[in-house]
Image (spheres, rainbow, N blue to C red):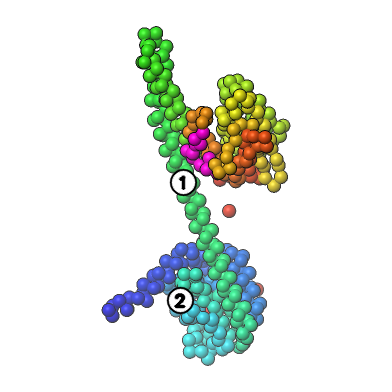
Amino acid sequence: MQDALVDQPHLEELSRQAVLRDYGLPSSAAEGTSDKVSPPPELMNLVRLAVQITGMASGAINIITADEQHTIAAHGVEPEVCSREDSMCSKVFQSNQITVVPDAARDHRFVNNPFVNGVKSSIRSYASVPLVSPAGAALGSLCVFTTNRQELDPERREGLEILAAQVIEVLELQLRTRQLADALATVRRSNEDLAGFAARVSHDLKNPLTAILGYAELGEQDDSVSGPAAGYLRIIRGSAGRMLETVQEVLDFSRVGGSVTRERVPLAAAVDAVRQDILPLVQDSRAGITAVDAELVADPTLLRALLQNLIANAIKYSRPGTAPRIAVLTETGDTQVLTVVDNGKGIAAEDRTRVLEPLVRLSREGDPPGTGIGLATCARIASAHGGSISITDTPGGGTTVRVDLGPAGPPGTAEGSGRSSAGGRP
């Protein structure tokens, strides 16, 4: 039991050090070292304001490690590192309350401190507020000090406490930003792994599927094959063809979300290229496709994939007996918006969000077979451009898909952050 009590302060200190590591503290090194990091301007401004509010000569934000004090921002003095034993803040930063000392030379906690007794400085007035994380870990102090004896009235004490709370807010923001950056890096690595995996799997699947399709076609052309066998070959060829299409769509979906290189893309030319890619669909359905004469600044490969998916869908899901009419429009302003309008079957309001998810298909009579990946790929393309996608109905019947492609951005870019007399700090 006694050993447990003895070890408790040590365990608490280890826990506190772990919190400091999570915050990335201390974040700057002493002056003169090669790895010095400039303090964030927000922290510098808070220290300067603390000095102005209290009327002291100098101020500092000090982080206390296991054996040292690191000044990560200062005003009126130069940042440096001193031992925890020499630090004034280390004596009171775990008190959980503001410390105000009008004359440190008369305070038993500081009378022999080198920043007070003249060895390093001759500080008299000193005030500090502990920097405590939301989880209750003491990180260090916001302190102000001067070589003159000075009182600190309640209003100035309150101002110092408010500024200490703001220091914690800045440190919290830095922590969350760092965590977000780490999460984004993990997502990018995951996407790269997914693309690599999908490429390997698609290669392994495409070869046998292509062979199945080839042999099925040869079998259908063989005059000696008739009756039920010929029907089985047609079923095999159809199933293998649909599977090959699914494999390709999964591969396309996995590749979206990496680096986006924006270029000026003439919309009418991009739509003409898509029309050639899906020519059998266009001819079979007598579809009419129009596009405005405009330019978008987007990734040309992804934009073509987006248009191909949306235009092909508009044709496939046309109303029976009605020739598809598709208009491709743009709006420019703070962001670029591509709109594809059709006169087809439309999508019910309750289904317009979920059809943008992978592998979601609507079960409607007369709909052609599909994989449920096309619109999900469009959503990823919009997201890769920093935008989004939305679906509404077309007046008179049909579907209107609006794709926000983000700000135009520059083409050719890839997208994918005086010294006081105190002479030192406590």
Q: How many marks?
A: 2
Percent of width and height locating residue 298: 63, 38
* Rendered-image quadrant of the N terminus: bottom left
Can residue 197 be seen at all in this image of the molecule? yes
- The vertical placement of 169 against 306, above or below, is below
**Label 2 sits on residue:** 84
Q: Is residue 230 magenta?
A: no
Instruction: Tell me the amino acid under the disc marked 2.
Output: Arg
Q: Which residues are magenta?
A: 353-364
Classify mark 1: helix, strand or loop: helix
Which is nearer the eye, 177 or 141? 177
Percent of width and height locating residue 396: 67, 35
User: Circles 2 and 1: CB distance less than 8 Å?
Assistant: no
Horizontal relation, residue 381 to residue 410: left or right: left
Which is nearer the eye, 330 or 190? 330
Classify mark 2: helix, strand or loop: loop
Residue drawn where x is 49% and y is 84% of the image: 113
Which is nearer the eye, 404 or 127? 404
Specify few, some or many for label 2: CA neighbours under 10 Å numbering under 14, 14-19, or 20 or more.
Answer: some
Percent of width and height locating residue 146: 60, 82
- The vertical placement of 183 against 361, above or below, is below
Image quadrant in which you'd find residue 12: bottom left
Q: Residue furthest bottom?
A: 106
Horizontal relation, residue 386 to residue 332: left or right: left
Which is nearer the eye, 281 or 417? 281
